[in-house]
Amino acid sequence: MTAYMSSLPSVGMLLLTGMVFLLHAPVLGEVYPFGISDDDPFATDDPFATDDPFATDDPFKEDEATNYSALREGDSLNVTLEIISVPRGIGAELARRNPDEIELYAELLRQIESGNCQLNAFHNLTTSSGVIAELSSAGDQHYMIEFESPQSPPGNPPAWVLEQLYAPITPSATDTQSPGDHLTLKANVFDGGEVEVVLNFYRYGDGQRKKWGHEEAQMELTNFYCERIRTHAITSLDRATLMGTTEPESRANEAARTHFYFLTIECPDFEESVNEEKEETRSGFVLVYESFSLPLAEAASQRRQELSDLEIYRSSLQKITSNEARLEKLTVIRGLPGASTWSESTLEMIYPSDYQPPGFDFAVGLPAIPDSSQVSRMFPYVNSAFEAKNVGDTFDVELCFANPPFNLADLRVNLTHVSQDDFLHYGQGKSKIDKLNFLVQEIKTGSVVSLDRPYLLGTLSLPGHTQAIDQEKRVWLAFVTVRAIDL
């Protein structure tokens, strides 16, 4: 029997149990226009359009260029992408200060010199305005995707031959992944010095092998960790621009870190052809997402006191210094109104979903019920089908500013954290199987938010049964802060 993994199903609807959401319910009117496409990675009613985060298809669409000024085509561009690894606490503190991006970049360079931060990657390429450019720094890694079940040799060989030639589960087909960095970018330069950027960057880590099954039926499945930024944004020439963040895979006993992505685009032959004074244009947004965990009683008390979102946010920051609260998640993303913007840090976990029960594997020609002089062998259960789930963090957001601008924005958020739970074991002996469970923390919502003010999306807590009985339960509070970008 062959167990096929080459047609893994996509991630289905994520079911939530034992989780309470605290959501705002604004009334949306026509003054807050937004455009959302129909694709849905999680459910048929999800308003967000996202491709498979592990797909290699070209993510670019021929969107009409933003009419800031005349589009320049063919100009030579020098593009630099720097990835700076920052401790999560330092990254969150810098994001809250809301410094100018030039100041933020300079501060991180100083942190690199002091040893608090590290330059994780540096990529550079030359391209032209209006051209899709690709850069990869990766290798090929082969991994098994199909396996043959244990089997005996044909015929009626002697018992010692059966024992020696009995074949365990055997890999029968492979696939290839490319661990490393992959950058695809399209930059449109305008006469006024603005640059419209469509960026898709993803990084696969080295494949991690996980053993499944027992004895002769044991197999190894390979999982890949992925960090991804996909966004459509406006920036300026000769300026280091923060495009977003991801969180790399954390190892045991290591503090959580955040990767900051800075993009710099230079046009050596650029001469600004518009001498008139330019009006400031609301050209995009930067969104900061933070999730704090604090004791259940404290979270409930804050809500009963009818504190504002800003007061709850400030209280959470104060409790971090006293170790009563913890910063659990941090994501920063830059985007354009009306465009879906995506940040992801996930492990593509492949795991068995169906099983072939144990049985006897007789040599061909032996009777169905062998006597004591004949040899048979009982093989354990065999994994016969597989599924895949992205374990980690995904953050999909779409935003539109109110028109005319009232310092409000219409926000759509699809926020998911998936983690591994304990393994459960069923059966015994050769019938023993292992089942992998997952914990899901998720918010899908739409709200009208005020700019430059923390906004509480809701509670994003772990299921109660997963928290230690002898410890106080904790509640996660999910905040977003939206800032408009004016060029």
Image (cartoon, rainbow, N blue to C red):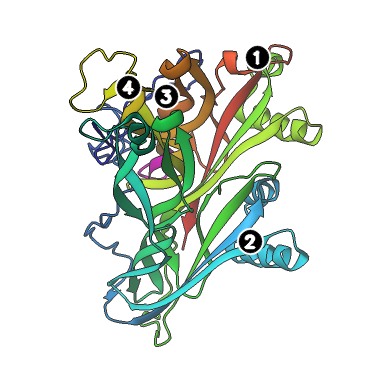
- Of pointers 2 and 1, the one earlier in the residue sequence: 2
Task: Mark yes or no: residue 211 visible.
Answer: yes
Dot 4 corresponds to which residue?
A: 376
Are dots 4 and 2 in contact, CB under 8 Å? no
Residue 397 falls inside the magenta stretch? yes
Q: Nearer the viewer, mark 2 or mark 3?
A: 2
- Of pointers 4 and 2, the one earlier in the residue sequence: 2
- How far across and how far down the image is residue 400, in percent? 37, 43
Are dots 1 and 4 in contact, CB under 8 Å? no
Circle 2: residue type: Leu
- The residues tagged by marks 1 and 4 sit, at their Cα atoms, a distance apart of 64 Å
- The residues tagged by marks 4 and 2 sit, at their Cα atoms, a distance apart of 70 Å
Image: 38 above or below 275: above
Q: Nearer the viewer, mark 3 or mark 1?
A: 1
Name the element at disc 1: helix
Q: Nearer the viewer, mark 1 or mark 4?
A: 4
Please state which of residues 439 and 386 is positioned toward the viewer in this rendering: 386
Are dots 2 and 3 in contact, CB under 8 Å? no
Q: Magenta region: which residues?
A: 396-409
Quarter where residue 316 is shown: top right
- The residues tagged by marks 4 and 3 sit, at their Cα atoms, a distance apart of 69 Å
Q: Residues within 10 Å of mark 2 (few under 14, many from 20)?
A: some
Residue 449 falls inside the magenta stretch? no
Image: 344 above or below 259: above
Dot 1 corresponds to which residue?
A: 300
Name the element at disc 2: helix
Q: Which mark is residue 104?
A: 2
- The residues tagged by marks 2 and 3 sit, at their Cα atoms, a distance apart of 34 Å
Task: Name the side, left or right, on which 253 lies relative to 121.
Answer: right
Dot 3 corresponds to which residue?
A: 26
- The residues tagged by marks 2 and 1 sit, at their Cα atoms, a distance apart of 36 Å
